[in-house]
Image: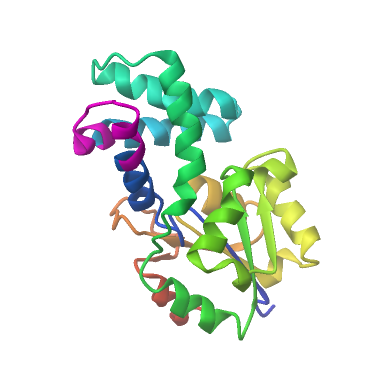
Amino acid sequence: MKIQHVFFDLDHTLWDFEKNSALTFKEILPAANVTVDIDLFLNIYIPINFSYWKKYREEQVTKKELKYLRLKETFDALKLPVKDEVIHQLSDEYIAKLPNHNHLFEGTFEILEYLQTHYKLHIITNGFEEIQTKKMKKSGIYNFFDAIITSESVGVKKPNKKVFEYALEKVNANASNCIMIGDNLEADIEGALNCGIKAIHFNSENSNLIPKNITSIYNLLDLKEYL
């Protein structure tokens, strides 16, 4: 069946999470009198944050625990004494100020303008509901999308089939006429495929570890070859 609906992940797919995250930390750490080399901080923080998002997807930690522990473990690894009250303050400020930085991946506007003339576009995201819409509005991409599905609104997270089934019902679509675009092999690609939805992996990291049976692109504009 012909594709009619294109679902996108947001963070790491359209919205350049790592770049925007780094800019946010460069702003809030000095303001909280936390003196640390930002590159060293990010080298420790990024894999810790990645691991906690995996735990969050798997319901092993709560949202509150994720926000606190990813910073706590980073400071501990750096042997940097930071009081709990400061960590909680930083975790809240990070969430509040993250949407103020709105770098997108190369080709985002061009590919969305191209696709919107042919398909209905939607977002499926595990990101925190209170900031995802802000990110999209401030970066100028909000109006491209008909539906925005957050895991918090569903009650479970990608790759849980309930997220994708909820999305299909919300946009009145069949799995066979939909496709999912995302960066995370587990949450986006396997989650969609397990629900009968076609999927394309956005390999922004140029990883050579992508399974050969997965369709993968390295630039968003490459989607024109498939859609």
Q: Quick one: 86 or 8, which is closer to the camera?
A: 86
Q: Quick one: 33 or 56, which is closer to the camera?
A: 33
Residue 13 lies, in percent from the top left, at 45, 59
- Whether residue 147 sits left or right of residue 36 in the image: it is right
**Dominant SS in magenta:** helix
Q: Is residue 88 magenta?
A: no
Residue 99 lies, in percent from the top left, at 48, 51
Q: What residue is drawn where x is 41% and y is 71%?
A: 220
Asked which quadrant contains residue 61, the reply is: top right
Q: Is residue 40 magenta?
A: yes
- Give the residue at the far bottom of this rendering: 117
Q: What residue is drawn where x is 41% and y is 51%?
A: 17
Residue 212 lies, in percent from the top left, at 38, 59
Q: What residue is drawn where x is 46% and y is 62%?
A: 14
Using the image, determine if residue 17 lies above or below residue 180: above
Residue 61 appears in the picture as rendered? no
Asked which quadrant contains residue 48, the reply is: top left
Q: Which residues are magenta?
A: 27-42
- Whether residue 23 sits left or right of residue 160 in the image: it is left
Q: Quick one: 75 or 30, which is closer to the camera?
A: 30
